[in-house]
Amino acid sequence: MKDSIVFFAPNSRIAALATNAISQMNLSIPVEEAIDYEAVELLHKYPSCKVAISRSGTADLLRGVKGLSVVDITASYYEIQRGISNLIEKRCKNISVISQHNFIGLTHAEFNVGDVKVTLNPCKNTEDIISTVERRVDCGTDGVLGCVLAIETAKSHNLIVEPLESDFFSIKKVILQALEMLEYLNVSQKNFECMESVLDNIDEGVIFFDSDNKPAIYNESALKLMQPESKEQWFHILEDYMNRANNVPRVVNLNQNKVLFRSIPLSGNKFISGNKTSSNVVIMQDSTAIEENAKNIKISSYEKGLFARRSFKDIRFESLVMEDAVALAKRFSNSDSTVMLFGETGVGKEGFAQSIHNNSPRAKKPFVSVNCASLPQGLVASELFGYAEGAFTGARSSGKKGLFELAQGGTIFLDEITEIPLEVQSQFLRVIQEREVMRIGDDRIIPLDIRIICASNKKILPLCEQGKFRYDLYYRLNVLQLTIPPLRERSRDVLVLFKAFMAEFLHKNEEYIEFEDSIRSVLLTYSWPGNVRELRNFAEALSFYGDEIKLSNVLNILNHDKEVVSAGSDGGQQVLNFKDDMPLAEIEKEYYRYMLERHSNAEVAKLAGISRTSLWRKLKTLGLSD
C-alpha cells in the first residue's frame, strides 16, 4: 500500500541521508522534515500510514496516534564513540552525553577514557534534557555530546558542544526495521481478517468480552443464540454461567434453548481488539445441532469392534533395533502405566498398541482405538467423555457413553494425541490423574479402570513451548516411552515384510516367494518414506502383475518416487536404467551413481541405511569413489 511508511526527519541532514538510503534501496517512502506536533499534523497527508520513522520527542508524540506504529531513529555505539573522540580532541576533560532515552538507548553510566570522565545521561523528555544539562554543569562538565536541545542549552552555559547525529548506516538500518514492522502488521491484519472469516463461518457462537465486560468481537451465530437480548446485557446474562463453567463444557438453558456452553479466561494470553483487552471468550453451540452432527460421525473403533486383532507374533522383523523395541513393549505390557508411542507415519504404532493390550492382563477386556485428528473439534468432548440423559434435545433417553467409558476394564489407544484441542486437554488431564470421568451435562462422577496408550508422529515438547500442548499433560502421558524406528533404519526387515505381504496377497507360503537379486537391491536401497504402510501398499500393487515378480514391474510402481525417478530432457519421467538381466553389482552401481548426482554423501548414506564409512567403502568397490 502506498505511503504505508513515512520518514519524519528532524533536520535537513537526516532528510538527505534518508532520501539517499531510500533511493539506493529502490523504495518509495516519503520523507518529511518536521519535529514535534508539526510531524503529527503532517500525518493527515498520509491516511494510509501504518509505520512512522522518527526520533526522540517526536517519536514519543507520534506514539500517541491511534493505530500508528513508530520505529525510533537511534544513535549507534560508533556514533557516540566518534562524538566523544571529537570532544577529547577539543581538550574536554568532563564529557556528558545527553539525549532522549529512545535516541541513545543507553542506561545511565559513568566511565573514563584515559584521564577524561564520560557520563551517559538518557532523558525522559525535553524538560529532563534541560535540567540534566544544568545539573551536569554544576558537576563540572565542560563538553556536551547530544541532541539539538541539549546542544542549545549547553551553548547557553558556554560549554564545548558536539552534535550527536545518525549516520547513513543507522538510517538504512531503521528503514529496514520499519519494513519488518510493516510486514508484521500486514500479516497480523491478514490473520485477524482470517479469524473474522472463520468466526463468521462456524456453527459455534463466539463472543470476546473486553476488560470492561463489553462484547468486543462476536459472530453471527452468537448473535442468533443471544437474541432478543441487547449486547449491553450479554455479560450480565452469561456471567453466572461463566463463573460455573470454568473451561468445562456444560449444557445450560439460554433463551428457552439448551446450549452447550464453555467459557475460556484469557489471563496471561490476552486478545487485543482495537484499544481494548479481551479477558474472556465464550463459546456456545445449540445442543440440537450437536446431536444431529453426532449421528453422522463414524468412529473407527465402533466399526472394528472393541477388541484388538494383532499381537506381538504379528510383528515381523529381523533387525536388532526392532528386537529391542518389541522386547521393551512386552515389558510395558505387564504394567498398567500410561505408554507413549513415538514414530513416523506408517511405522505400525497401532499394531504395537494392540500387541501391548493383548499381552497384558486386560487382554480379554475392550480395546478402543481413537484417531484424535478425525474427531471434529466441536464434538471431541462429547465423544471422549459422553453426555448425560436429556443433555440435548432429542438425545438418547439414557445418555451416551464416551470412549473412555467404552474402554472400561480394558485399554484406550489415542493416536495423534497432539490433535486434541487445547481446551479439552485440561479435562483429559483430570481423567488421567483421577481415573474418573464426568459426562457433559451431568454432575455424576464415573470411576474408570482403564489403561491408556497414546501415540504421536510429532515431537511434543516443541508443541508445549509453542503453547499448543499442555506441559502437565505431556508429563502425565510420557511415563513409559517407546520409539518405533522407521523402515529406513532397519533395512533387514524390508525383505522379511515384503515376502510376508506378497505371500498374503498371492495366497502362497512365504518359502515360494522368489525374486531376483536386482529386485532385492532396489528394495534395500529405497528409503520407504511411508514406512511399513507404503511397503504393504507396494506389495499389494505388485501382486496384481501376477505370481512372477519382475524388476520392470517393481520400477513401474516406484517410478513416481523422487528417489527412483528423474526428469527426462523433455520434462517427462525417466526411470533408472535397470534391466532384468543386469548383474547385482551393476544394479548397485547405477543406483548409487543416480543418487550421488542428486544428494550429498551424507544423505545417500542415510537413505541407504549405512554409515558414511560404509558408503565410502561401497563406492570404492563400485568404482565411484572419484
Image (cartoon, rainbow, N blue to C red):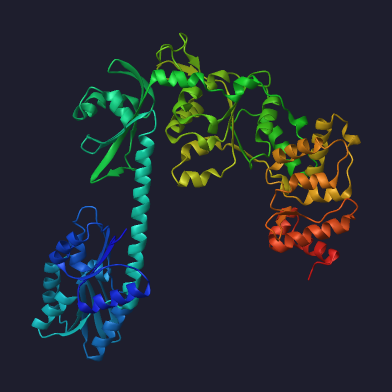
Q: Which of 626 and 320 is in front in this view?
A: 626
Instruction: Answer with left or right where residue 625 lies relative to residue 444.
Output: right
Q: Nearer the viewer, residue 589 or 28?
A: 28
Instruction: Answer with left or right where residue 390 lies relative to residue 486.
Output: left
Q: Nearer the viewer, residue 202 or 210?
A: 202
Whether residue 405 appears in this view of the structure is yes
Q: In which quarter of the image is residue 161?
A: bottom left
**Dividing the image into 4 quarters, which one contains the C terminus?**
bottom right
Where residue 74 sits: x, y (%)?
Answer: 28, 70
Residue at 35% across / 34% down in the picture?
200
Where residue 624 sits: x, y (%)?
Answer: 80, 66
Q: Which of 341 and 388 is in front in this view?
A: 388
- With respect to residue 431, does 603 lie above or below? below
- With respect to residue 572, does 543 lie above or below? above
Instruction: Answer with left or right where residue 464 lies relative to residue 35.
Output: right
| Residue farthest to the front, as pictured | 570
